[in-house]
Image (cartoon, rainbow, N blue to C red):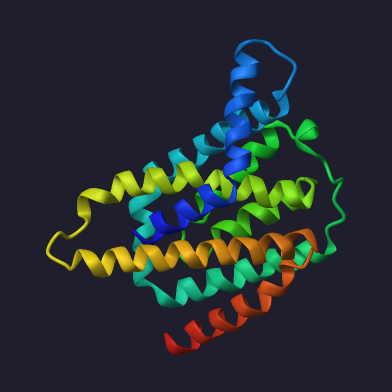
Amino acid sequence: MLHLGTLLAVVVFFWKDIARMAQGSVSMLKRERKDQQEGKLLLLIVLATVPTGLMGIVFRDWFESFFSEPKLVGVMLLVTGGVLWVTRYVRGQNRSIEGMTWRDAILIGVAQGLAIIPGISRSGATISTGFYCGLDRTLAGKFSFLLSIPAILGATVLEFPKIETTGTIWGTLVGAGVAFCMGLLSLKLLMGIIRAGRLFNFSYYCWGVGLLMIFLAK
């Protein structure tokens, strides 16, 4: 339910982009020239979702077993910090959606699939991979968050039957509402950080928490 709250935040924040993608897909079906780039963006998101979905289905139980290994989670946080840190040295090609390829989409989708491992940041992994592929910073951030929509929806469908009905519904709704509000705020702040090329600043947090987890897990 918390993920569902952040999903709604993504939909609201990128509503105009989602609408343009829908229009672009219609234009592509009608073989019209207008809005075709937005239609291409939608196709690439669908393509990137395939490896994420396959990895989630095939390796789901294995990945979830990591949640009982706090030391491993700490190590994965260190890995995330390293991935983010390296982005400061990336001098990308600033490719727009016109220059984005199916290979870029597949690589970003695989990065999202690996983020099922606790300690690997989904947004950090996918945005960094977009940087490494030479995408424009804004496009890398936008693609990452738009890609989260089918991923979170899929995870929600898989996990929904496990939701306990004996708890207080109001507590659940309040939690989802807070996640929605914080999601909107975080998106606004994070997109600004991405455009400024300062994503690597989050590496310090990941390293600090990762080392703390490894120390406490001894």
Residue 49 is situated, as x and y percent measured from the top left of the image, at: 52, 38
Residue at the (71%, 25%) spot, across then down: 35
Residue 50 is situated, as x and y percent measured from the top left of the image, at: 50, 34
Q: Nearer the viewer, residue 157 or 25?
A: 25
Residue 152 is situated, as x and y percent measured from the top left of the image, at: 43, 49
Instruction: State whether residue 89 is above or below residue 72.
Output: above
Q: Is residue 177 left or right of residue 187?
A: left
Residue 119 visible in the shown view: no
- The residue most toward the left is 166
Q: Nearer the viewer, residue 157 or 91?
A: 157
Residue at the (36%, 59%) spot, across then down: 64
Instruction: State whether residue 110 is above or below residue 2.
Output: above
Q: Is residue 139 left or right of residue 26?
A: right
Residue 128 visible in the shown view: yes
Res. 188 image quadrant: bottom right
Instruction: State whether residue 134 is above or below residue 172.
Output: above
Residue at the (84%, 46%) spot, across then down: 94
Labels in figure, total: 0
- The residue most toward the top is 30
Instruction: Name the quarter where the C terminus is drawn.
Output: bottom left
Instruction: State whether residue 175 is above or below residue 55.
Output: below
Residue at the (76%, 45%) spot, across then down: 133
Q: Nearer the viewer, residue 18 or 144?
A: 18
Instruction: Name the quarter where the N terminus is drawn.
Output: bottom left
Residue 28 is situated, as x and y percent measured from the top left of the image, at: 64, 17
Res. 216 image quadrant: bottom left
Q: Is residue 82 left or right of residue 150?
A: right
